[in-house]
Amino acid sequence: MSSLISAEGICLDYPTKTIFSDVSLGLADGDRIGVVGRNGDGKSSLLKVLSQTMEPDAGTIARRNGLRVGMLGQTDSLTDEDDIVTAVVGARVAEHEWAGDPRIRGVMQGLLSDIPRDRLVGQLSGGQRRRVDLARVLVRDWDVIMLDEPTNGLDIRGIQWLADHLNHRWPRGTGALLVVTHDRWFLDEVCQNMWEVHDGVVEPFEGGYSAYILQRVERERQARVVAERRNNLMRRELAWLSRGARARSSKPKFHVEAAKALIADVPPREEVIDLRRSEVSRLGNDVIELKNVSKRFGDHVVLDHADWICGRGDRIGILGENGVGKSTLLDLICGKQQPDSGRVKIGKTVKFATLSQQLTELAPFETDMVQTMLNRYKSYYVIDGKEYTPGQLLQQLGFNRKQLRSRVCELSGGQRRRLQLMLTLIDKPNVLILDEPGNDLDTDMLSAMEELLETWPAVMLLVTHDRYLMERVTSDQYALLDGKIRHCPGGVDEYLELIEKRRHERHMASREERREEKAAREQAQPAVELSRAERHELKLRFGAVQRKLEELSSLIEDRNAQMVAADPSDYQALGALAQEVEEAKAQIPALEDEWLELSEKLS
């Protein structure tokens, strides 16, 4: 594989922290690399340095001549006055040019099908704007693509589409991908190698996220073995040193210095608190029941005479596309909104606790120091038979003493989310409502939160686009579809199949509706007799379209047969074949519409 980008001796310092210290690494053709690490350790900075949008304090970056690098940052530079098409493909590209490009059509359909093309960027929501910026990157031809949190703003179907697109984007052994994301399912689906950014270094791992975790576990096991050996030696040395003042005075100086060295780098003992063992409020058999509930906002129907029951012990994930009304459903359940009709019945013993997307629960404490805010709560909580202060509990979620003295408004997004999670759990609720709880958390903190939630003794209602989190901490999934709450026994995969089936049915219904409207217009107008030359031209075009449809159908059958016969481990070859199939399928709907139109004119 040829080298695309190489970095040698990279150093980067911020006023209060060293981000990189003498880092050397490279990116080659065929690389698909995921970047992980704690919040603030330098993942985004690494992408900026490699894309040369940020200059390191020391070291060099070398790139292959003519290298084309596409970069999706955490913020965009879109122009509010541009419409969607102009923002994505540019003002100089005519509609017939981009509409005839399978890649651009596929990206527009995959990411922006729910947004009118004449909508201005300034009128978009934050999530829609993020998708437009991602589409802007994906429609162009790049040798290297660097993506910083590309799944932000995407629902589960959008994340699935993005993974498929990136897996099939380049032919085998070409192109390179570097992606920063906290979505572990996405990392496993797309990446072949991992880079972990920590303590000023970038450490490589082979394989996707699952392989990276296995290697980290093995690395930590080996570190524990080394530490245990050192501790045994340290205990022997300390015992030897403590055998009386007279004995100590005669010991060789080098032996004493060796023992001090053993003690010097021993980390302070950390006591892990298992919040799962905290008692929760007692819960009766009746929990949540929706009876014939309807809720709408203007023309948008969230629920349409929906019935649903959530019982004791249920751990439920709520699935649905962006804007369908998942957060509204949670608000109806906990009483923040009222249904237009029907009844939401809540058990008498239910005690709700909500972790919202916007973290509005922290709003009253914005100007308070974290420690001052904690003083408003009980002085201690009993967990597993031991007493702990709120400050001690918070330190188990990654806070240090300095951060406890910070004001709430000065905390990062991840710190604010951890603070609210702790406050939510110490209230001992028996029904947890979690709306995107993984936002702003790094992969390590996500794992810690999952371990906490997995066996938390309460009913749980979870809304998240993090498929890994959804499948790990919930036992049942329900989808909000067409105003109903539909059980998905097959989980996320069944939900994605339902979405695709629904989209196909809507597409076919739309085609039929357009066909009927056209027929009605033609009936209202006097028939126009075609000249012999016009009919001949239409026949030629009709035949060309029919041949093209047959060619695409044969191509799809042929590539599917090749995929069946291919080596299952040769994922790059399979990806190239699958990409050809997808590009062929993308051309068929427009050709079918044209075929129908021509056949009507010739009939």
Image: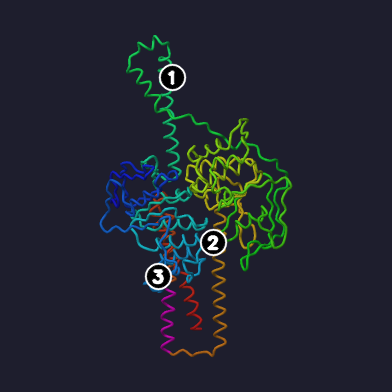
What secondary structure is found at the residue carrying circle 3?
A: helix
Q: Quadrant of residue 202?
A: top left
Question: Mark 1 — residue?
Answer: 235
Label 3 amino acid? Trp
Q: Position of residue 164 (x, y in %)?
A: 45, 56
Classified by dominant secondary structure, the portion drawn in magenta counts as helix
For disc 3, the marked residue is 98
Residue 502 covered by magenta stretch = no
Residue under label 2 = 500
Q: Left or right: where does residue 223 sit relative to residue 503?
A: left
Rendered location of residue 246, percent (x, y): 39, 9
Closest to the observer: 303 or 190? Answer: 303
Disc 1 residue type? Arg
The reply to whether discs 1 and 2 touch (Cβ–Cβ < 8 Å) is no
Instruction: Quote the CA–CA distance across marks 3 and 1.
Output: 72 Å
Q: Tell me if mark 1 has few (under 14), some (14-19) or many (20+) residues whose alpha carbon lies within 10 angstroms of its own.
A: some
Q: CA distance from mark 2 to mark 3?
A: 24 Å
Q: Which comes before the other along the chain, label 2 or label 3?
A: 3
Magenta stretch bounds = 532-547
